[in-house]
Image (tube, grey):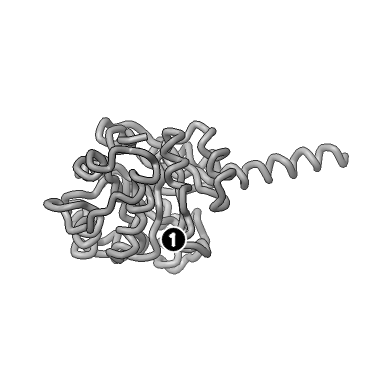
């Protein structure tokens, strides 16, 4: 359960794959963690719940050897602190556009001396983990993922990548399409050119590139481009697709 190996995998150049939690319940979390994933994405940016509603869900993921990754709603110290306090191994911060914003996220995510995050024994105490050890070594496990979601952010990418403490830079294709003026046009040539260049730029800086996609063929394409941190849809959505296919076959 502790420490989770996600940070070590990233440091060793391995590709890590995850999927989104379809609903914030213990049974859905347990079922999701039975798939062969490295992390589970818990979204508190767009979903109608926050860290206070998660209770033991991140701990359940940890018990299955899966890293809970919580996307917070904004680059806010209170939100980032609560996400880690409830048990996140990784926190994703959206809408990072400058190196200054990236530096603030690092400050909020790590305990001193690396950052200024307030100390809490919350999740280790709930999980029965030695909380003294977990607190002293938390910075060695903590994974910070920053989202690049605008033209401004992409133009500042090399400066952002220079900020110490970033584990993954993650391009958000949907928000990026909006920023480029081609909202939801995911195959727009300018967007695809940007996405192809993204991991190449970051490889020169030693930072893994991440993104999120649903189509399996497109996921494979992006992995071939050099992406090493990939969110792959969610099992419920794929299950619905498969089930509809089964029903269509039965009705013929």
Question: Is 142 or 119 nearer to us in this picture?
Answer: 119
Q: Position of residue 145 (x, y in %)?
A: 32, 51
Question: Is 61 or 12 nearer to us in this picture?
Answer: 61
Q: Position of residue 69 (x, y in %)?
A: 40, 48
Residue at point 23% right, 54% down? 119
The number of discs equals 1
**Which corner quadrant holds the C terminus?**
top right
Which residue, as the protein is rendered here, is positioned at the far left?
113
**Vertically, is 21 above or below 36?**
below
Q: Residue at label 1? A: 52
Residue 116: quadrant of the picture: bottom left
**Vertically, is 248 above or below 170?**
above
Residue at point 62% right, 45% down? 236
* Whether residue 45 can be seen here: yes
Side (left or right) of 183 relative to 165: right
**Which corner quadrant holds the N terminus?**
top left
Side (left or right) of 8 relative to 219: left
Residue at point 55% right, 46% down? 26
Question: SS class of the residue under badge 1?
Answer: helix
* Whether residue 194 can be seen here: no
Question: Is 106 or 102 nearer to us in this picture?
Answer: 106
Q: Position of residue 88 (x, y in %)?
A: 37, 48
Disc 1 crowd rating (10 Å Cα; few below 14, some 14-19, many 20+) is few
Residue at point 37% right, 48% down? 87
Q: Position of residue 79 (x, y in %)?
A: 34, 63
Side (left or right) of 12 relative to 183: left
């Amino acid at each position: 359960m502790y420490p989770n190996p996600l940070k070590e995998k990233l440091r060793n150049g391995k590709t890590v794959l995850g999927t989104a939690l379809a609903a914030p319940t213990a049974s859905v979390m347990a079922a999701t963690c039975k798939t062969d994933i490295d992390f589970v994405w818990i979204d508190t940016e767009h979903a109608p719940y926050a860290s206070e509603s998660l209770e033991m869900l991140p701990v359940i993921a940890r018990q299955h050897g899966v890293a809970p990754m919580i996307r917070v709603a904004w680059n806010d110290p209170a939100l980032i602190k609560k996400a880690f306090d409830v048990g996140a191994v990784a926190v994703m911060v959206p809408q990072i556009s400058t190196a200054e914003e990236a530096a603030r996220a690092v400050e909020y995510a790590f305990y001193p001396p690396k950052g200024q995050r307030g100390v809490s024994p919350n999740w280790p105490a709930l999980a029965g983990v030695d909380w003294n050890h977990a607190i002293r070594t938390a910075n060695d496990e903590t994974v910070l993922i920053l989202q690049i979601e605008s033209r401004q952010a992409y133009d500042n990418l090399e400066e952002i990548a220079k900020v110490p403490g970033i584990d993954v830079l993650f391009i958000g294709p949907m928000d990026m399409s909006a920023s480029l003026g081609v909202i939801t046009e995911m195959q727009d040539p300018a967007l695809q050119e940007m996405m192809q260049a993204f991991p190449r730029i970051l490889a020169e800086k030693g930072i893994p590139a991440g993104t999120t996609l649903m189509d399996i063929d497109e996921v494979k394409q992006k992995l071939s481009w050099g992406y090493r941190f990939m969110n792959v849809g969610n099992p419920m959505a794929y299950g619905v697709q498969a089930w509809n296919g089964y029903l269509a076959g039965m009705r013929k």
